[in-house]
Image: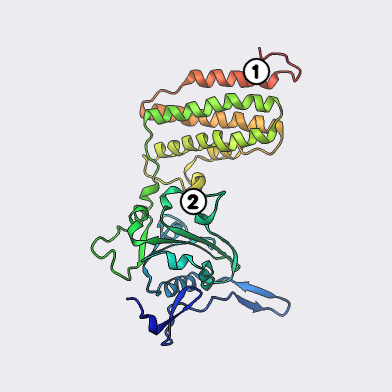
Amino acid sequence: MHLNRKSSKKISGLEEPLNGVAHRPMPAKIILKFDQTHYTMISRSEAEMMELILEVAKDPRIQAVLQDGSRSNPGVRPDIFQDFDIIYVVNELSSFLKDHNWVQVFGEQMILQLPEAMELYPPTPELEGAFSYLLQFKDGNRIDLTMVPVARLGQLISDSLCKVIWDKAGIFKAHPLPPASDASYIVQRPSERSFTDCCNEFWYTNAGLAKGLWREEVVPAQELINQVIRAALLQMMNWYIGCRHEFSVNTGKWGRNYQRYLEPEMYQKLLATYPAADLQQVWRSVYMAQELFRKAAQFIAAELGYTYPEDWDKNVTAYMQHVQQLPKNASRIY
């Protein structure tokens, strides 16, 4: 229900009724405890944070409060560093965006990021029409707040981790969301074409890496490893884990659950693919990545009835071993 213009006043772009019942709390303060020698910060509890989030949501422009991320995932073990991934479903965005200082109501900020207002690091396309406030607070808490107009809601609630915290306007009354789960993040069985593409990307890029290592260009080589080769390796590791668990598990963001699902030997080999900025260590880590990729891919191929491209593997491996031994004053490759 919207407040009558005569019965409310604007404060920093927020609605606050004059009858003394505020729709927004005063800006939250970080509590300091004195122990006779110095002041120590006390982080706000989960209950305090959720109470604040819901209190702010009393603003009449906010129609519903949703949560996603790790706090909605029943398979995640809670810890003190979990973000509060919150979605405010709103009537409109423009009044919120006139003055971004309104988010100070959540507490004293260490740093704020506004993805939709950035040029160098634009947001992901699926958030088109929404606006995000990524708030890191001085007490260690963090809120990733997404403001979504009702008309754009469908693009976000497809996430299986999305759950309704407060349906103020009854938006979900007719079509309630299913219980939150990580179903959207379960490793999917690859098609044979996707499997072959991953193998091609891995081995082709390894062949290109060889010249950078021969030139002793450690920084470009590291970038190629981390941006391309590792992406293909981790994709294969995801499928490997999926294959071993009948494609029923979630490997987690950036491989968070690898240690849980990989055999100890495989996990240690994976760690060995992260080298220091030393040329010989980079070579060793690349060969370890190849060994790991090979083992995972051959297992997947056998399980799914696909063909592993042994010729790419053998040809590129032999070429890289040759290039590694090539003198620095060589006038030709062969």
Residue at 43%, 87% in the rendered image = 20
Residue most toward the right? Answer: 329
- What amino acid is found at the position of numbered circle 1 in the picture? His
Residue 212 screen position, x and y as percent: 66, 27
Q: Residue at x 64, y 32 (%)?
A: 221
The one of 301 and 329 positioned closer to us in this rendering: 329
What x and y, as percent, mark residue 44? 54, 72
Q: Which residue is mark 1?
A: 322
Residue beneath the point at 36% across and 26% down? 305
Quadrant the N terminus occupies: bottom left
Measured from the top left, where is residue 22 in percent x and y?
A: 44, 81
User: How far apart are the alpha carbons under marks 2 and 1?
Assistant: 43 Å
Q: Quadrant of residue 93?
A: bottom left
Closer to the N terminus: mark 2 or mark 1? Answer: 2
Q: Amino acid at mark 2?
A: Pro
Circle 2 sits on which residue?
123
Give the residue furthest to the left.
174
60 left or right of 33 in image:
left
Q: Judge whether 294 appears above or below 157 on screen.
A: above
Q: Quadrant of the C terminus?
A: top right
Q: Residue furthest top?
A: 334
Q: Nearer the viewer, mark 2 or mark 1?
A: 2
Q: Residue 309, how many percent across, how many down?
A: 46, 21
Q: Relative to residue 180, is residue 27 drawn left or right?
A: right
Asked if 305 appears above or below 50 in the picture, the reply is above
Instruction: Report whether 58 appears left or right of 11.
Output: left
Residue 226 picture quarter:
top right
